[in-house]
Each structure stands twice: as C-alpha cells, then as structure tokens.
Image (spheres, helix red, strand yellow):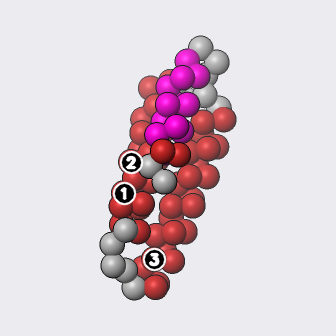
Amino acid sequence: MTTDENLTRLRAHHNNISRYRRLLRTRLLPLERQFIERRLSDEVAALQSLSAFRPSRSPSVSQGLDDRCRLQR
C-alpha cells in the first residue's frame, strides 16, 4: 500500500469516527445507538491497525490523525 493510499484510508476512518461521534450526541433509539457504537468501535480499531503500519519516514501524519481522534472524544 502506498503512502497516498494509507493517508486516504486514515482520513476516511477519521471522518467516519467524527461522524459517528456526532451522531451519538443526537437522539437515537437504543438499537440505533448500539449499531453506531459498534461501528465507531470498528472504525477506531481499523484506524489503530492502519496507524501501526505507517511508513517510518513520516510518522507524524498518522500520529496527527490519532491525536485529533483522541481530542474529539
């Protein structure tokens, strides 16, 4: 996987995490909330997994996305 593909995937996971957290701040049925929490957990795991394989030349890019995800909680 190239660096560009990696960054695109990191951005997509980050955007999904932001969207799910935003949805969790709204009124939801218990089943909807459960589904979104599960998807959020999946996205966070995917982001962490992808971040573990970041290229050694530019660790700050994916680390910056990780930091932003932690700050939005």
Q: Which residue in the structure is indicated by mark 2?
A: 15
Q: Which residue in the structure is indicated by mark 3?
A: 33
Main SS, magenta residues:
helix
Q: Identify which amino acid the numbered label 2 is placed on.
A: Asn
Spatial CA span between label 1 and label 2: 6 Å
State the residue in front, 64 or 49: 64
Q: Is residue 29 left or right of residue 44?
A: left
Q: Identify which amino acid the numbered label 1 is placed on.
A: Arg
Spatial CA span between label 2 and label 3: 18 Å
Q: Are discs 1 and 3 less than 8 Å apart at CB?
A: no
Q: Is residue 41 magenta?
A: no
Question: Residue 47, position in %: x, y?
Answer: 56, 45
Q: Give SS at disc 2.
A: helix
Q: Mark number for residue 58?
A: none
Task: Please report the residue visible at 66 percent of the width from the left and 35 percent of the height from the top.
Answer: 52
Seen in the picture, residue 60 relative to 47 is either above or below; the reply is above
Question: Residue 49, position in %: x, y?
Answer: 64, 43
State the residue in front, 47 or 65: 65
Q: Give SS at disc 1.
A: helix
Residue 73 seen in this snapshot: yes
Q: Are discs 1 and 2 less than 8 Å apart at CB?
A: yes
Q: Which residue in the structure is indicated by mark 1?
A: 19
* Span shown in magenta: 58-69
Circle 1 residues within 10 Å: few <14, some 14–19, many ≥20: few
Q: Identify which amino acid the numbered label 3 is placed on.
A: Arg
